[in-house]
């Protein structure tokens, strides 16, 4: 069945600008979202770090591009990952997205972050945020949304993260999420390391 998020005859996401060239859309998305990320911390009205905050963040970042911004995906997705030799992460089924997300958010919100040192904070936080990323709530834009949520959560809970480091290392961060989401073969050390660096520099 044809992916409903794509135009009928080309593998490009349907978008509000009606850009039907993949490279042009990629550039437009990069330009628009970089601007929207500048004020995302001030733009989110949600006080709680729950499911609705994730939807609001995605809506703010991608709302100028996609009609479905801020809405969970309705289709299963598979992405060939270079660091997995072309294999895909097992993302949550659409029917499980909200349930899986709420379970992780509950763990995040119930953790007593103040009792951890920096290393323990980074290790625990990296694993929970990786689990949240693996749910992949949206058809596109999950890494930017997840990292934004993570930095907002961290600041509210007393361990601010260096956003510049995370932005400048965006490719590394995404690959680290992939490596941390590979089931029994998951490797967490890459994500833990950059999270610890970001916290120490924050």
Image (cartoon, rainbow, N blue to C red):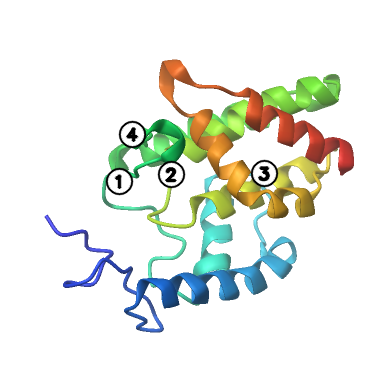
The answer for how far apart the CA atoms under marks 4 and 2 are is 16 Å
Question: Is 72 placed left or right of 57 in the picture?
Answer: left
Vertical comparison of 130 with 80: above or below:
above
The quarter of the displayed image where residue 92 is located: top left
**Residue of label 2:** 136
**Residue of label 3:** 150
Q: Position of residue 143 (x, y in %)?
A: 54, 49
Vertical comparison of 85 with 156: above or below:
above
Q: Residues within 10 Å of mark 1 (few under 14, many from 20)?
A: some
Q: Which mark is residue 120?
A: none
Q: Position of residue 131 (x, y in %)?
A: 52, 31
The answer for how far apart the CA atoms under marks 1 and 4 are is 12 Å
The quarter of the displayed image where residue 177 is located: top right
Q: Is residue 95 visible?
A: yes
Disc nearest the viewer among 4 and 2? 4
Q: Position of residue 197 (x, y in %)?
A: 80, 36
Nearest the viewer among 2 and 96 is: 2
Quadrant assignment for the C terminus: top right
**Residue of label 4:** 87
Vertical comparison of 148 with 102: above or below:
below
Question: Is 117 placed left or right of 73 in the picture?
Answer: right
The answer for how far apart the CA atoms under marks 2 and 3 are is 14 Å
Disc nearest the viewer among 1 and 3? 1
Disc nearest the viewer among 4 and 3? 4
SS label for mark 2: loop
Q: Evaluate if marks 1 and 4 touch, with contact meaning CB atoms under 8 Å apart.
A: no
Vertical comparison of 65 with 78: above or below:
below
Q: Evaluate if marks 2 and 1 touch, with contact meaning CB atoms under 8 Å apart.
A: yes
SS label for mark 1: loop
SS label for mark 3: helix
Q: Earlier in the sequence, mark 1 or mark 3?
A: 1
The answer for how far apart the CA atoms under marks 1 and 3 are is 23 Å
């Amino acid at each position: 069945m044809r992916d409903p998020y794509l135009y009928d005859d080309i593998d490009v996401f349907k978008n509000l600008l009606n850009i039907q060239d993949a490279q042009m859309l990629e550039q437009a998305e990069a330009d628009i979202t970089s601007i929207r990320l500048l004020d995302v911390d001030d733009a989110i009205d949600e006080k709680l770090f729950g499911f609705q905050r994730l939807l609001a963040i995605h809506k703010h970042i991608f709302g100028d591009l996609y009609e479905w911004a801020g809405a969970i995906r309705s289709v299963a997705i598979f992405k060939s990952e270079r660091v997995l030799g072309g294999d895909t992460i097992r993302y949550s089924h659409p029917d499980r997205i909200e349930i899986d997300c709420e379970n992780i958010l509950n763990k995040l919100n119930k953790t007593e972050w103040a009792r951890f040192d920096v290393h323990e904070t980074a290790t625990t936080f990296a694993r929970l945020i990786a689990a949240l990323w693996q749910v992949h709530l949206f058809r596109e834009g999950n890494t930017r949304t997840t990292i934004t949520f993570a930095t907002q959560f961290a600041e509210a809970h007393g361990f601010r993260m260096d956003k510049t480091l995370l932005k400048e290392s965006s490719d590394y961060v995404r690959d680290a999420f992939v490596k941390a989401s590979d089931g029994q073969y998951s490797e967490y050390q890459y994500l833990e390391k950059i999270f610890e660096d970001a916290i120490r520099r924050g």
